Image (cartoon, rainbow, N blue to C red):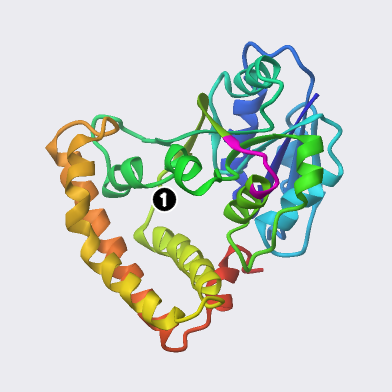
Amino acid sequence: MISVIIPHLDQPEALRSCLASLSAQSGLQQAVEIIVVDNGSRVSPAEICAAFPNVTLMSQLVPGPGPARNLGVSNAKGDILAFIDADCIAGSGWLAEIARCFEAHPDYAILGGDVRIACRDPHRLTLLEAYESVFAYRMKEYIAKQGFTGTGNLAVRADVFAAVGPFGGIEIAEDRDWGQRALRLGHRTHYLPAMIVYHPARKTLAELAQKWERHTAHDFVRIQSQRGWRLRWLLRSLAVALSPAAELLRIGRTDRLKGWRSRALAFLGVVFIRCYRFWMMLALAFGASAPAWSGRWNRA
């Protein structure tokens, strides 16, 4: 059996679309259970979950997607655990690819797949769609260079998850932490390009900024434990501010954008985000609260 685990917080319509995509999976022979773990939504998604078969709704009031996923795991019956976020849409063969790969490769323990941007009009992208098509969810790169994949598209054998241990809390980047702990135990994450989920681009620059607040705060907490962290952090801040020029080649060569209009929008997005990250990094270096920024997952 495959247990699909979905953390949820105040995204009812996105959750409905996610569950619909899971109900429409093709080519799968194994049984599937779906566990939605609500993390303190203002309105319970009970009615939405009840509209789909094999869906169990649970509640985890400890803030953070990590604790929510951990509760789902502790109640899962499957020998394979598949993680997807509530605002993602599973490709039609997502679960079949997971099952096929694990069956074909008994030595594989952890899989990470491709995350693509779901664009409203593929022929006329918005600035955020263009930017995130190139720079968001670079799972192949994360796996190759940092040894982890995002928990919005992750599959792991249940016994290996138990050996690695639970996801961390809201104060850290729980996907990177978990993947790197697994790697230290000898469990490498394998990239599976046909294991596809789609994520909508954020609707506003404020939403994208909020994402980077959390990620930057996590990075800051990590580097503070190292010698000479302040100088290293300031040098890294400067590198972030100067980095947009270096991204021109990536934008020009990507196969995820078509036409110069989309490429120009992607570059504008890079300039905005890197400047905002530079400001955040300076603020943290000189006394801003990292826990306040990393705690934005759950505002209830």
- The vertical placement of 288 against 38, above or below, is below
70 or 56: nearer the eye? 70
- The vertical placement of 159 against 230, above or below, is above
Q: Residues within 10 Å of mark 1 (few under 14, many from 20)?
A: some
Which stretch is magenta?
184-189
Classify residue 15 by image quadrant.
top right
User: x and y percent of residue 181 in the render?
Assistant: 66, 52
- The vertical placement of 234 against 134, above or below, is below
User: x and y percent of residue 289 in the render?
Assistant: 52, 82
- Main secondary structure found in the magenta portion: loop
Let me know if residue 295 is in the magenta part.
no
- How many discs mark residues in the rendered view? 1
At horizontal 80% and vertical 53% (from top left) the residue drawn is: 59
- Give the quarter of the figure containing the N terminus: top right
User: x and y percent of residue 290 in the render?
Assistant: 53, 77
At horizontal 13% and vertical 38% (from top left) the residue drawn is: 260
Whether residue 189 appears in this view of the structure is yes
53 or 278: nearer the eye? 278
Whether residue 44 appears in this view of the structure is no
Q: Is residue 36 left or right of residue 203?
A: right
- Give the quarter of the figure containing the C terminus: bottom right
Let me know if residue 186 is in the magenta part.
yes
Dot 1 amino acid type? Arg
Q: Residue furthest bottom?
A: 287
At horizontal 17% and vertical 56% (from top left) the residue drawn is: 245
Residue annotated with mark 1: 202
Q: Is residue 209 left or right of residue 90?
A: left
At horizontal 46% and vertical 88% (from top left) the residue drawn is: 287
Q: Is residue 189 left or right of residue 55?
A: left
- The vertical placement of 72 against 191, above or below, is below
User: x and y percent of residue 75 in the render?
Assistant: 86, 42
Mark 1 secondary-structure assignment: loop
